[in-house]
Amino acid sequence: MPEDILVDIKKDYVLSKLRDNERIDGRKFDEFRKVEIKTGIIEKAEGSALVKLGNTQVLVGIKMQPGEPFPDTPDKGIIIVNAELVPLASPTFEPGPPDEISIELARVVDRGIRESEAVDLSKLCIEAGKNVWMVFVDIHALDDDGNLLDASAIASIAALMNTKVPASRFGLGGDFELPINDVPISVTSLVVGDKFLVDPSRDELSIGNTTLTVTVDRDDNIVAMQKSGDYLLSESLLDQIVEASIRVSRKIRENLLSQVSKC
Amino acid sequence: MSRPDKFIIDGKRLDGRLPDQLRPIKIEVDVLKRADGSCYIEMGKNKVVAAVYGPREAFPRHIQDPSKVVVRYRYNMAPFSVEERKRPGPDRRSIEISKVSKEAFEAVIMKELFPRSVVDIFVEVLQADAGSRTACINAASVALVDAGIPMKGMLTSVAVAKVDGVLVLDPMKEEDNFGEADMPFAFLIRGGKIESVALLQMDGRMTRTEIKEALNLAKKGAMEIYNLQREAIMKQFVEGGEENA
């Protein structure tokens, strides 16, 4: 119950600030929190990245192994994205099988990577129809201070860029770097009336989980979209959010590339 | 199924449709006896049935909300609905579809009228052929009207795909599987006019301009579907009502 009252107080505060066209942490409406990326921190994983988006923290690890291809893509590798919102990350997360929130998160991250063709799956064929590389992207939420989705998407692509295919371990020749073709960036906005707040924090999300996620590839194409939450979206706001997401994604991508290539 | 070389030949799609043409649609209202409201829809080869139960007492009790009704939505595919048998029960795709569809209905149902209650929407896909989530939403929307649940308007859903660089309305299986993009929409239609977007997803590759064009194409298709939904409801309540009187 005290939690409920706190949420109401936060909600009123966020809304009263919004009436003055301000955000509670002083950010601009289209401003992301600070993004910090560390790659290669899990030695046992083929690739990994820890992303801090403000106080939100997500760790992504990549594991790879040979396996049977899908019958409809016999000469292509397989990529599987999974998310676990472990109870350590938030008092509202519970142990157990993935719920609809973690499933949606994993599937939206998956769509961004898949549709931008970020990983060149055609270079992950070992023997057509029999053996291909399987890439497991496991998202581990550590601290949910809002917008786990964008943090997870950034961590996933950063971890993939950090991945070495463990060919020698399976007696399949020398290790090589995972071929990466694109860097998709997801931009989530909280929709409040006729306004939208890019990269909402936990406190801002107290007014409701009414978001629109737009994932953009490096050529400014939209590769994935997801409206989430029980709200109605106007056409004009949709276009404004798409426009802002394209703009913001360029900055985030530049920032990501500057941090990941350094490692 | 293999990838066709071309999706559009002489301006026509593989099944002979024009890019802005819907598949044939059939709507029947009140097809189930036990449910409070129900609807059967065929959209092309999609065959789906929706049932609405409620408003009824929310159970288990801890899900009750003293300020509004709880909406539940279950999208379920029959094992025989697709080429290769689908293992029964919810998979990740069904859970995601159920979530976004539920949220779309939450945005249009007058929830404050039924505190502590639940409205259950169950949709069963008997046969799937691309766009089953849109067919399910259209069926659920009519079933809600049939159950007498107050709403801000009708929800009408349709998808737009991109094939050979052309936007096409209500994609069929080949266009969905091998196309360049797929974008399902659901609109709130009130007083015969499209008011806002209640459901929106996209995967593929589209420019900002194409997204605007896709939205306009979807709106055109949605208005056609809305008229059919309306016709089916009117037939049920006006003609049926007279017969019964």
Image (tube, coloured by chain):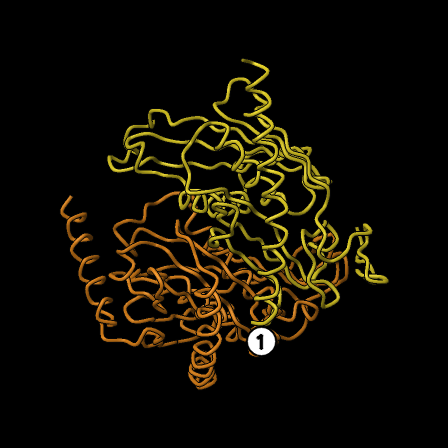
Chain colours: A orange, B yellow
Q: Position of residue A154 (x, y in %)?
A: 44, 70
Front position in the image: B142 or A182: B142
In the displayed structure image, the side of residue B172 where residue B41 appears, left or right: left
Q: Is residue A35 above or below residue B39?
A: below
Q: Secondary structure at mark 1?
A: loop
Q: Position of residue B218 (x, y in %)?
A: 60, 55
Q: Is residue B241 above or below residue B40?
A: above
In the displayed structure image, the side of residue A8 where residue B15 appears, left or right: right
Q: Amino acid at mark 1?
A: Asp
Q: Quadrant of residue B11?
A: bottom right
Which residue is drawn at the image coordinates 57% and 30% (left, top)? Answer: B234
Q: Quadrant of the C terminus of chain A?
A: bottom left
Which residue is drawn at the image coordinates 39% and 76% (left, top)? Answer: A38
Q: Quadrant of residue A199?
A: bottom left
Which residue is drawn at the image coordinates 58% and 55% (left, top)? Answer: B219
Q: Is residue A43 visible?
A: no
Front position in the image: B46 or A231: A231
Q: Position of residue A170 (x, y in %)?
A: 63, 64
Q: Quadrant of the N terminus of chain A?
A: top left
Q: Is residue A64 visible?
A: yes
Tag 1, which chain?
A: A
Which residue is drawn at the image coordinates 60% and 31% (left, top)? Answer: B49
Front position in the image: A186 or A46: A186
Q: Is residue A39 above or below residue A103?
A: below
* Residue farthest along the top direction in this orientation: B245
Q: How many marks?
A: 1
- Residue that label 1 marks: A182
Front position in the image: A210 or B234: B234
In the displayed structure image, the side of residue B132 where residue A203 appears, left or right: left
Q: Residues within 10 Å of mark 1 (few under 14, many from 20)?
A: some
